[in-house]
Image (cartoon, grey):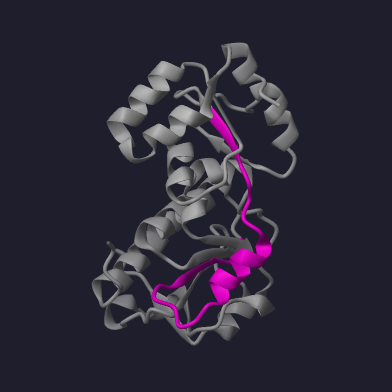
Amino acid sequence: MTDPLSRWRAHAQGAVLLDGFHALKHALRFGAEVPVAVTTDRRAALALAEELAGDVRDTLDGLLTEVSGPEYAGLVPRPHPTGVAALAVRPSRAAQLRALARTPRTAPVVVLDNPRNLGNAGAVIRLAAGFGATGVVTTGTLDPWHPTVVRGGAGLHFATAVERLDLDDLPAGPLFALDPEGEDIRGTRLPDDAVLVFGSERTGLSAPLRARADHLLRLPMRPQVSSYNLATSVAMTLYHWSATGGVPLV
């Protein structure tokens, strides 16, 4: 089956949409299986790879197939400025759960407690991948593999474990929950096996997770400032972990 549109249709069910050049680049770097990738301008896409992603340029050369603008627009809900799209095989839930459960851990797990905003969830996954976190877990109804989340994560779902779990199935480890009534995070050293919990953008921590927390921590914040963006809170917390003994990134 050599026609890219036929290959796309054959793999679309259950696949992960990689929306744009950078999502495809990151997914390939971290081992994603990509059965089909298309572009509206193959020469431009390969030139971009030459400039920004030489490590995957040859892989892209063998993978990308050029299609017309209308054909491309018919495959994706929001055409990306780079004119690149691909489908990747979603990692199995069993593999994700093994990665989250593996001990000893060398980096924390981030838990988003009933998040609401798809873009925020994607930004958190991108942050977690950048810091080398073990994974990102969501509770509640949001699908962390939703196309909008993957777009916000720039394809870095494949660089860390990402899964939705019930509260009773969270990974083992000391649970540190971010809460305005907690102790100042600057006085706490976060261990590598920490489970870092962040509440919903609108309602904060749920009562069950707050009750389960081993430690409540708060981020430094000027009086009368109501809150930080969720991704900002995760970034500050992961940076604190990395600056106080986290595993060096290589």
Residue 88 visible somewhere in the drawing: yes
Q: Would residue 81 be counted in the magenta stretch?
A: no
Q: Would residue 87 be counted in the magenta stretch?
A: yes
Q: Quadrant of the N terminus?
A: top right
Which residue is drawn at the image coordinates 58% and 16% (left, top)?
Answer: 67
Q: Quadrant of residue 15?
A: top right
Q: Quadrant of the C terminus?
A: bottom left
Where in the figure is residue 175, as x and y percent of width and height? 50, 81
Where in the figure is residue 197, as x and y percent of width and height? 50, 72
57 versus 146 height, above or below? above
Where in the figure is residue 245, as x and y percent of width and height? 26, 77
Q: Which one is in front, 14 or 130?
A: 14
Which residue is drawn at the image coordinates 60% and 65% (left, top)?
Answer: 96
Residue 203 visible somewhere in the drawing: no
Which residue is drawn at the image coordinates 48% and 29% (left, top)?
Answer: 62
Q: Quadrant of residue 215?
A: bottom left
Q: Which one is in front, 164 or 10?
A: 10
Where in the figure is residue 102, as x and y percent of width and height? 53, 77
For the record, the magenta segment spans 85-114
Furthest residue toward bottom: 214
